Image (spheres, rainbow, N blue to C red):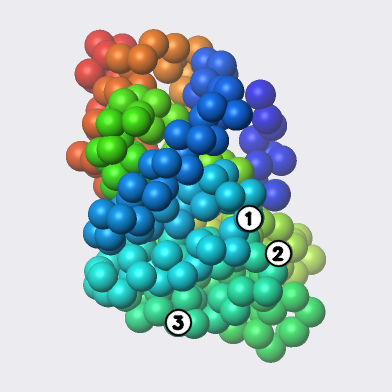
Amino acid sequence: MVFRGFLLSCGVLPIAMLALLAAGCTTPRSPASDQTRIRQARSEMIARGDADSLATAAFLTRLATGSWRDAPPLAGRAMAMAPKRADLAYLGLLICHQQPSCPSQPYEERLRELDPANGVVWLFALRRARQDGSAMNAALTGLAQAQRVDLYWTALVSHMTAALAAGARFEQGAAFEYVVGIDAAMVIPPVQPVSTSCSAAAIAQADVLVRCRGIAAAFEQADTILFESYGNHLAARLWPSDSAQGTALAAQRRLLDQRMAQWSRDELNTPQAIRTLAALYGQNPTEQAAQVAWYAAEGIP
């Protein structure tokens, strides 16, 4: 099992991936034969040509071809077919981010236009800013003004699972495992620059403290449990423990720790359990809501 702190400093894995890893469900299981099936499925999805099929084909490109080179054009075609969908704009940005030579700024601008309340775009801007102090300050300010930090996780996974399963080469559970597994291998900008900017020394300045509290609040509204957990950890450093905010944060931390521990156990160890979770991803807007619904469906308190 990978340590949560490592995941948060180097990127983020949705908690479903932790559960699948704990259950021994890793992707791919037999690289040679599975890569052939993935290549065939990718070709079929390109031929189908709808937005979700093209997006999924882009997403599978590296596994199918060994390189991300052909993925951005496919992602661009998917975005053009569904220009109002912020989740596809985010996927295009994420795929572009896998290649250092891909210019990510146009994708960032498109996502900000479609979903200005989502702060995830500023994580990419932070990574691109590097040592540019002005650009880093602008990205941190934008993140502090965001309402949430979303990966469009359940929407993308459910759409791509359906697209991969549509060709009959993969049943729903296997398609779900593949999509989640491939996503786990993708590079997401780390949150370390945020943590550094909100260090104990930095928050001695009143304006920095206010900004960091805004950033923490955005992460607390994330659509993945690990990003929500990061927001809670960050906020706990920014509010006195005996304040009303500190008390509420401690209660939320206990709930999050309980969910993290339980969800990381060997729960998703049957094909039916995975199929149930895959179906629930299509019915719930966040990973947290899908998790609660899964426990209810499985009869687990």
Looking at the picture, tell me which residue is in the foreground, 122 or 268: 268
Depth order, front residue of 121/51: 51
Specify few, some or many for label 3: CA neighbours under 10 Å numbering under 14, 14-19, or 20 or more: some
Query: In the rendered structure, which disc, 3 or 2, sits on the residue that comes first in sequence?
Result: 3
Q: Looking at the image, which residue is at 69% across and 88% down? A: 134
Q: Left or right? Give the position of 175 relative to 38.
A: left
Q: Nearer the viewer, mark 1 or mark 3?
A: 1
Asked whether residue 111 appears in the rendered view, the answer is yes
Which residue is located at x 39 percent, y 42 percent? 41
Residue under pointer 2: 193
Q: Local crowd at mark 2 within 10 Å, few (<14), some, or many (≥20)?
A: some
Instruction: Please identify the quadrant where the C terminus is shown.
Output: top left
Label 1, on which residue? 67
Q: How many marks?
A: 3
| Residue 223 x, y percent position in the rendering | 39, 49
Q: Position of residue 291 (x, y in %)?
A: 34, 30
Mark nearer the viewer, 3 or 2: 3
Task: In the rendered structure, find residue 109 and report the number of the disc placed on it.
Answer: 3
Residues at marks 2 and 1, CA–CA distance in whole angstroms: 28 Å
